[in-house]
Amino acid sequence: MRDERRRLALRVSSGVAAGAWVVWRSWDASHLSDRSWAAAGTMLAMAAVTAVLPVVRRRLPAPGAVPALIGVMQFAIYACVPETDQIPRVAMLVVALGAIELGSRHVVPWWVHGVVAAVVLRSGIFGATGRESALIGALFACWPIVLVALVPGNALVAAAVGSIAAVAVARTGALEPTPGPAVVAVAIALPVSALLALLGGLPFTRRRCASSRRWRVSRR
């Protein structure tokens, strides 16, 4: 238990450091000196991502699965930020990571996923160019990764629902010139997607519990 807490603390501190790097690299482009909430949100978002990555890797163990989630994160960012010149280069990095995993049939360490996620988030915070709605959309693009770790049951359902929610926010409230619609979009998408992921995973959970009970009976 103590070792697990130390590992969690290491992942969270690594995420905060990665978020601080994103803030530093986007400070002038997105005028973060006037948007301290976005700077704090960036560090919190990266801390959340790195904290749950080992859980996501266990729930989606297939090579290429986590890079696919990071790819969704990149697509949601591309769908809402006004500055996109930097995104093709970053997308190539995500594709390369997925190709490496698929080609080697091996999942890379969690910190590699964390580094790539930080680069992707930086493309969003930088690309928002200070527009607050786009900053909100870029931060919410991390939600599919977090949702997979939070909701029990079928991880594929959680990944799909979280991805739809992130893209929906990106294409609605995050495109508006003011932050209000983006806040409303997140306030709707977050609980609705969490509920749908939970409900969608219930049949899987029930089947697993029934299978476990049958196994215990057969062992008696």
Image: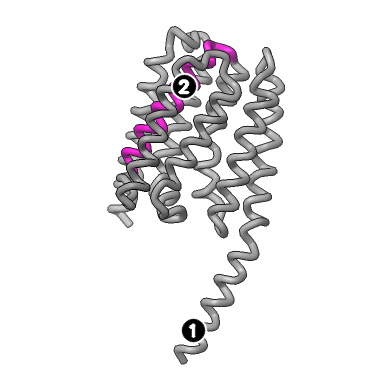
Which mark is drawn over residue 162?
none
Vertical placement of 218 versus 182: above or below?
below
Q: Is residue 12 visible?
A: no
Q: Position of residue 33 (x, y in %)?
A: 47, 9
SS of the residue under disc 1: helix
Mark 1 highlights which residue? 216
User: Could you tell me the amino acid type at mark 2?
Assistant: Ile
Q: Which residue is drawn at 64% across and 62% down?
A: 202
Judged from this view, the residue extending furthest toward the front is 103
Q: Is residue 108 visible?
A: yes
Location of residue 179 (image quadrant): top right
Rounded to the nearest angstrom, the CA distance separating label 1 from label 2 is 51 Å
Dot 1: few (<14), some (14–19), or many (≥20) neighbours within 10 Å?
few
Q: Answer whether labels 1 and 2 touch (C-beta < 8 Å).
A: no
Q: Is residue 118 covered in magenta?
A: yes
* Magenta-colored segment: predominant secondary structure: helix
Q: Where is residue 61 in the image (x, y as percent from the top left)?
A: 41, 55
User: Could you tell me the amino acid type at mark 1?
Assistant: Arg
Q: Residue at x 54, y 30 (%)?
A: 75
Number of labels in the image equals 2
Is 183 on the left or on the right of 64, as rendered?
right
N-terminal of the pair, mark 1 or mark 2, is 2
* Residue span colored magenta: 110-131
SS of the residue under disc 2: helix
Q: Residue at x 54, y 77 (%)?
A: 211
Mark 2 highlights which residue? 87
Q: Position of residue 102 (x, y in %)?
A: 37, 47
What colouring method underlies this structural image? one colour
Q: Where is residue 203 in the image (x, y as percent from the top left)?
A: 64, 65
